[in-house]
Structures are given as C-alpha cells and as structure tokens.
Amino acid sequence: MAANPQFLKFVDDNQDHLIDRLAQAVAIPSVSGNLSYVKDVENMAEWLVQQLKALGATVEKRPIGKHTIEGQEVDLPPVVIGQVGSDPKKKTLLVYGHYDVQPALLEDGWKYPPFELTRDPEGSGRLFGRGATDDKGPVLGWLNVLDAHKQLGLELPVNLKMCFEGMEENGSENLDKFIESEKDKFFAGVDCMCISDNYWLDTKTPCLTYGLRGVNYYEIRINGPGRDLHSGVFGGTVHEPMTDLFAIMSKLVTPDGQILITGIKDLIAPVTEDERKKFEAIHFKLRDIEEAVGAPVTIYDDSIQTLMGRMRNPSLSLHGIEGAFSAPGSKTVIPASVKGKFSIRLVPNLTIKSVTDLVIKYVEEEFKKLGSKNKLEVVLTHGGEPWIADPNHYSYRAAHRATEAVYGQTPDYTREGGSIPVTLDFANILGLNVLLLPVGRGDDGAHSINEKIDTSNYINGTKLLGTYMYELAASNE
Ligand code: BES
Ligand code: MN
Ligand code: MN
C-alpha cells in the first residue's frame, strides 16, 4: 500500500542518529519571552536553517518585527520557512511547529539537566529534556523524514512547505500578520495543513485531533498607595491592594471548576448527540489522567465528564500574582500594587470579545462592591479563539490510514484542552483544513518538570509523519 518500506526501515536503522538530532536541538535553551535567552532562541532558528539546508530544503529566516521584554525592545524570533519540491502534479502539504520552549531550571525539580537530552538510565526508553515533546521532537520528526528521503535518494511524495516559529509559548505575536502577508506568496498553492504540537490522551492510543480550546489571558491590576508600606505602621489605615485582589480572584471560579462570571455559561454551544457519541468513543480512563497529574485529584469521578471538562467546556485557572511578596521569610509589607493573572479556555461559541466584555463588566462590578479607594484595571494580555475542524476530510483519512499502518491501531478522534491560537489563523486566512497529528503521549509533561518523549513515540512519530505524506499522495480526493 502507500507506506514506503524503505523509508520505514531507514528510520528503524538510524534511531541513534535521529535521537542525536533531538539532543542537539534540546541543548539550545530556546526559551521565548525571556531576555536572558534571546540569543539562544536566535541560535535555535539558525540551527534549524542549517539543518534544513543540509537536508536539501530551500530555507529562509524571516524577521517579523520587534517586541518588548522586561522593558527592552528586541527582535521577535524569526519565522523559519522552508520548502522541498514544487511539482504541480503533487499535493502541497504545509506543516507548522514551534522551536521555542517553556523555561526550565534544574532547581525546579528536574531529575536531569533540562537542556541535556537524557535517556532514562532505567531503560524505559524515555528521553528527558525541555522541548522533547513540546515541540522539538515533533518538529524534528519532519526533518527526520527529509533526512531519510535524502539519504535514500527518494523524492518526497508531496511538496512540503514548512513554517516554524519561535514565539508560540508567548502568544505567537505577529505570526498572523506574517501569514496574511505571505498568503499569495510562500503559502500559495497549499492543499492542506498538518500541525504536530499536541499529545495522545493516554499513553497507548494514537489520535487525530480536530479541535482546540482558545485562551484569553487576563491581568487584574490594582494600584493603591504610592509605595510599598510597613504593615505595622499602615495596616488598618489604608485599603490594601492584595486584599482587594484576593476578594475579586475568589469570585471568579469555584473550587470545583464552575466559572462564576455572569453570562459565560449562556454562550456555550449546546452539546449535540453526535458530539456526545464522539466523546463516548474515546479510549480514556480516569487513571490515565491521575497518572498524568501525579495524584487522584480529578473534579469528576466520571470519565466522560472529565473529558468534556477538558475539551468541551470552558475553564478558568488562576495563575499567579505579580508584585506580591513571595520570597522565603515573613516580611511585613503591604504591596502598593499587584497584578492578578488568570486565563479562561474558550470553546464554541465563546469569542475573545464576548468573554472579555463579560469579564470586564463582572470584575468592575465586584470591585465596586468592595468600596475600595484603590484603582482597578482589567487587561486582556492575549487572546486566541477556539478552533474546530472537519475530520471528514481527505487529510484526516490519510492520517487515519497512516496511523493504522504504523501503529496497527485505529486512532481516537479527540479535541484538545490546550491552545495553539495560530491554528485558527492558518485555517481562516489560508482557507485550509488543518489536521493535528500528535507524536507524544498524554504523560509527556509538556511545560512541567521532567518533560520527556518516549523513544518509540519519537521513532514511530517520524514514521507516522512520513507515512501520512504517502497516504496523502495516494489519496485521489
Ligand atoms: N503544545 C501546546 C499546546 C497544547 C497543550 C496542545 C496541551 C494540546 C495540549 C503549546 O505549545 C502551548 O503550550 N500553547 C499555549 C498557548 C498560549 C501560550 C497562548 C497554551 O495552551 O497554554
Ligand atoms: Mn507546543
Ligand atoms: Mn507549549
């Protein structure tokens, strides 16, 4: 059938070489949005360019403007675009991934240095390192496919266009403008799109993902006294910003996850019977989630409700407070101004705007009730709309067959709780069907300590991405 045995054998025979490529990528600490790592993010882009060149792609590094980090204006990480093949008889596939990663410090509790890819000494096959699964492993999956074809002297079955960015973990600033401006240039002639930047739900069932929640990130800023104060001298005499902030933040969500902001529930699209069936068909046990989070702390005892909580319902999470006293010890300070941070994951039919209007109205009303003389500001720092695709498309069918060929298993069809806001930009601006084709497992620990990818997922993932290309090429839809 469509799978190419030569390609599959190459991947099996060259595992160490492919893992070494991942080790090189993980060794560059490309943490975006952090002044100390600006150079590393640039180096990572350059590393990708050199790799892609060596693999026979035409590559460009494109500047996309500037942004401010910690008060300093710096270049945004460049977008790396590459192309292999331009045969009008072949389908053209666009792939996207990100080469930036979340921060990681050994002190956070990592077992091994986060920027040294470390093979589990106990022989489980796990490869630990920041970015191993999010998203360097999957991005390198595409490079590995090119590598195999180059070394085997084989042509790719499709034309491949690649777009890799270095700001995904910080809201993909300006990438939408880049897509818009390159719509009829670099992105011209693309037939369909594949993104590998999410995960299986459990540790053994491959999946195809056709939806993502959006996310709105907010800051509640409360300004009071002109400077930090001594609580012995001024406690009991002034309105304290932290006290106001706690009062408000405690009114956003209940401990069992119910969002308290008036009006949000009414905007959620009703669950259809067909949708419920799709959720019921997913292989998923509460145990999977308990293992992934490391404790039996799920809100619901029911697995369908838990899945819906993750994929189908909005959620509100409290993230932190900037400006609060947080060092060890017991300093008796009244912080003069604080910023409370929270985000809301969005599902159809919630929009960035409709939710923001409700949030601002609600928070302002709650603040008024406090009778505080401090100043309040509610700011949306970034927003991304929810996305849902049609899984009844030839690209999904190709991925379905590729999954069966590589894993001998039928994939689950899932939606994700996480967000890749640029997915919707690609889908809307370029008018494309987008397929999310995950490589990693549900317990990989993206953003956590000890992030990993299993060797088998990295290797089979490479086979999957390549076989998907063959299946796409073979489909005459
Ligand atoms: N790879 C994730 C997205 C993701 C997370 C997909 C979990 C599926 C499950 C991506 O790198 C990410 O972390 N996205 C951010 C986006 C935010 C910074 C706008 C997220 O979801 O928090
Ligand atoms: Mn990612
Ligand atoms: Mn991420």
Image (spheres, rainbow, N blue to C red):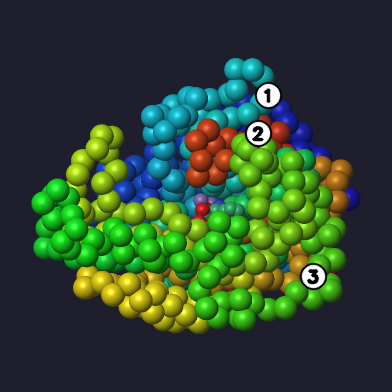
Identify the secondary structure beneath mark 1. loop
Query: Tag 1: Cα neighbours inside 10 Å, few (<14), some, or many (≥20)?
Result: few
Q: In this view, does 222 lie above or below 24?
A: below
Quarter residue 327 falls in: top left
Query: Tag 3: Cα neighbours inside 10 Å, few (<14), some, or many (≥20)?
Result: few
**Which label's residue is closer to the chain start, 2 or 1?**
1
Front one among 67 and 339:
339
Q: How far from the left and from the top, in percent, is residue 172?
A: 43, 62
Q: What's the residue at 33%, 78% (across, down)?
A: 368
Q: Is residue 230 above or below residue 287?
A: below
- Which residue type carries mark 1? Ser
Locate the C terminus by quadrant.
Answer: bottom right
Q: Which of marks 2 and 3 is in front?
A: 3
Q: In this view, does 286 lie above or below 393?
A: above
> Which residue is tagged 1?
124
Q: CA–CA distance between discs 2 and 1? A: 8 Å
- Which residue type carries mark 2? Asp
Q: How far from the left and from the top, in percent, is residue 256?
A: 60, 57
Q: CA–CA distance between discs 2 and 3? A: 31 Å
> Which residue is tagged 3?
275
Identify the secondary structure beneath mark 2. strand
Query: Tag 2: Cα neighbours inside 10 Å, few (<14), some, or many (≥20)?
Result: many
Q: In this view, does 386 lie above or below 50?
A: below
- Which residue type carries mark 3? Glu
**Would residue 80 be visible to someone looking at this image?**
no
